[in-house]
């Protein structure tokens, strides 16, 4: 699913960036070679970051 129409990146792109250790919205943009245009996607990026952190925490605690 497209997260950012201005820069043309998807949730998979964001999750790939997060998997490298990125945990801040500006760093996601930077790693994808993008910059916020309208910045509406920053909320979605932040949500994905939180979801991935929670998923990772849950996976670790389940072990």
Image (cartoon, rainbow, N blue to C red):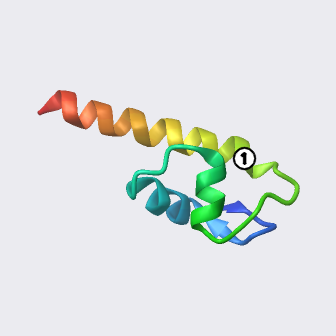
State the quadrant of the N terminus.
bottom right
- Residue at coordinates 63% horizontally, 47% vertically from top-left? 25
State the quadrant of the C terminus.
top left
Q: Disc 1 designates what residue?
A: 42
Q: Is residue 1 visible?
A: no
- Residue at coordinates 56% horizontally, 59% vertically from top-left? 11
Q: Residue furthest top?
A: 61
The number of callouts visible is 1
- Residue at coordinates 73% horizontally, 61% vertically from top-left? 4
Query: Residue 62, percent across and down?
Result: 17, 30
Query: Residue 14, percent across and down?
Result: 54, 58
- Residue at coordinates 28% horizontally, 31% vertically from top-left? 58
- For numbered disc 1, what is the local secondary structure? helix
- Residue 22 in the figure: left or right of residue 47: left
Above or below residue 24? Residue 61 is: above
Residue in the foreground of this view, choosing between 6 and 32: 32
Q: Residue furthest left?
A: 63
Residue 52, quarter of picture: top left
Query: Residue 30, percent across and down?
Result: 63, 62
- Residue 19 in the figure: left or right of residue 14: left
- Residue 58 in the figure: left or right of residue 36: left
Above or below residue 29? Residue 49 is: above
Residue in the foreground of this view, choosing between 1 and 29: 29
Label 1: few (<14), some (14–19) or many (≥20) C-alpha neighbours in 10 Å: some
Query: Residue 35, percent across and down?
Result: 76, 63
Q: Is residue 39 visible?
A: yes
């Amino acid at each position: 699913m497209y997260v950012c129409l201005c820069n043309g990146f998807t949730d998979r792109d964001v999750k790939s960036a997060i998997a490298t250790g990125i945990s801040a919205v500006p760093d996601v943009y930077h790693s994808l070679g993008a910059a916020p245009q309208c910045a509406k996607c920053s909320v979605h990026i932040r949500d994905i970051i939180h979801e991935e952190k929670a998923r990772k925490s849950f996976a670790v605690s389940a072990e």
